[in-house]
Structure formats: C-alpha cells, structure tokens
Amino acid sequence: MSGWRERLDEIGDRHGLDRSRRDRLARLLELLRDDPTAPTTVQNPDEAVDVHVADSLVALDLEVVREAKRIADVGAGAGFPGLPLAVALSEARVSLVESASRKCGFLERAIAAVGVGNAEVACARVEDWPVRDLDLVCVRAVAPLAVLVEYAAPILRIGGSLVAWKGRPDVAEERAGAAAAEYLGLRIGGVIPVKPFPAADRRMLYLYSKVRPTPPGYPRRAGMARKRPLSG
C-alpha cells in the first residue's frame, strides 16, 4: 500500500469513514494527480491527502458540520472542503458554488469520477445564487473574514452556521469580521484551533451562527463585498 493510502486510512479511522467512503476519497486524490486541468497547485497525493482531504474533514470535529443537511462550499475551487464533506456526510446535500467556468468543469468531472451523488455544482457568483435557508456555509482560502461573512449571511437560515478555514489569526481581520457579523445578523461562535495533520501550522476554524435576519439590501451586487468590505 502506498504511503498516501495508508495516511488516508488514518484519516478515515479518525472520522469513522467506511471503506466505500475511503475509496471515493482515493479516487478524488487520483483525479487530482492525473487531471492536468485540476485547479490546484497541490496535486501529488502524498501531499494532497493532508493539505486537501485531512484539512477538509477536520471540520467534522464540529457538531454543526456533522448535523448539517444543506451545505454550500463557497468558492469551491478544486472542491475542498465540499467534496470530502459530501463523501463523509452522505445524508447531506452539498452545493459547490464556483464562478469560474473552468473550475466548474473540473468539479463536474470530479463528482462523476468520485461518484458523489449528493454533490452538485452551482456555477455562479454567490451573490447571484438564488438558494437560501442553508444549514451550513463552508469557505476555505477565499477572502478575509468580513467578506466571507457577507457571502454567507444572506444564504443561511436562522440558526445556520458559517465555518471559515484560516491560518494564523489576524487581529484586524478578526475585528472586521466580528463587526460585519454583528451588522448582518451573525454572531461569532468560536475560534477553534485544529490540527488536521502533523505539519499544519496554526490552523483555525472560525465559527459564526446566524441569530437574526440579514438586513435588506444583501447580498449586494457581485464584487461589492470585496471592493467595499463592511468595516463596522
């Protein structure tokens, strides 16, 4: 057995994944390795098993993730964390929201190759995506916290959650995120340090809960959250 497959079994043991789910994750790693159009610089399974799969599945440590039934991965890119979460959470429906058509094409091929029937691609800007009342929004390596909060707030139900993957905490970014959350009807639920793999350096999951309706006028038109982020 190759080293990355052994590592995948360790990840599977940690999260209680059966052989069928592990095999799907292996097919995903093989697709990254073999597809030259994969939209990520990390394609070698020996590295991707941790950087992509373990990092995605660490969110299963949170109860709000394990219990979510309607999930969006915003800015899905190559499909992380959305595809591994769809594999792990077979009762959930996972939308991979991505605006770049080239990346959307890869995501469609990945869903077919991996055999993830509970995942779908939404090839759209999140500001233009009409779906609402989601249980969970996941965002990894996309934008500062204030922008992520603005992306998530309009599409979450009351009681729904945003989970944002971040590295070393930045005080100014945290303050801006908290201010945007307060204005948009979210509340910070915690900053959870995680260790998805041994070499992970200061990995954090920022958890926000939607506690009030988002004010009228949101989402703003596409691009405004980045161009003029809420500052409080």
Image (tube, rainbow, N blue to C red):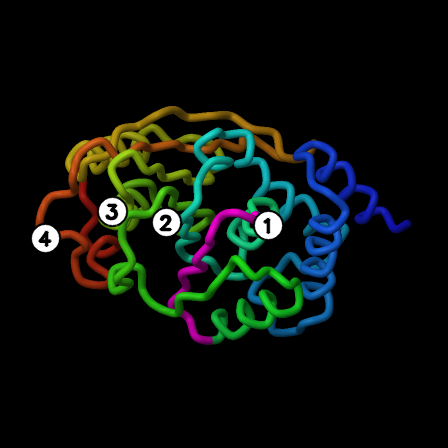
Precedes in sequence: disc 3 or disc 2: 2
Identify the magenta region: 90-101
Amino acid at the residue labelled 2: Ala
Secondary element at tag 2: loop
Q: Nearer the viewer, residue 133 or 6?
A: 133
As measured in the structure, the alpha-carbon distance from the residue carrying label 3 to the one carrying label 2 is: 11 Å
Q: Residue at x 36, y 39 (%)?
A: 162
As measured in the structure, the alpha-carbon distance from the residue carrying label 4 to the one carrying label 1 is: 33 Å
Above or below, 134 relative to 36: above
As measured in the structure, the alpha-carbon distance from the residue carrying label 2 to the one carrying label 1 is: 21 Å
Kindly identify which numbered label has been placed on residue 84. Answer: 1
As measured in the structure, the alpha-carbon distance from the residue carrying label 4 to the one carrying label 3 is: 11 Å
Marks 1,3: beta carbons within 8 A: no
Q: Residue tagged by mark 4? A: 217
Q: Seen from this angle, which residue lies furthest front?
A: 91
Q: How many marks?
A: 4
In the rendered image, residue 135 lying in the magenta stretch gets the answer no
Q: Residue at x 64, y 63 (%)?
A: 115
Say which quarter of the image contains residue 223. Answer: bottom left
Q: How many other residues sit within 10 Å of disc 1, few (<14), some (14-19) or many (≥20)?
A: many
Amino acid at the residue labelled 3: Glu
Q: Residue tagged by mark 3? A: 150
Q: How many other residues sit within 10 Å of disc 4, few (<14), some (14-19) or many (≥20)?
A: few
Is 226 displayed left or right of 66 in the figure? left
Residue 10 locus on image (x, y percent) = 77, 36
User: Could you tell me if residue 23 is visible in this image?
Assistant: yes
Secondary element at tag 4: loop
In the rendered image, residue 99 lying in the magenta stretch gets the answer yes
As measured in the structure, the alpha-carbon distance from the residue carrying label 2 to the one carrying label 4 is: 21 Å
User: Could you tell me if residue 232 is visible in this image?
Assistant: no
Is 65 displayed left or right of 7 in the figure? left
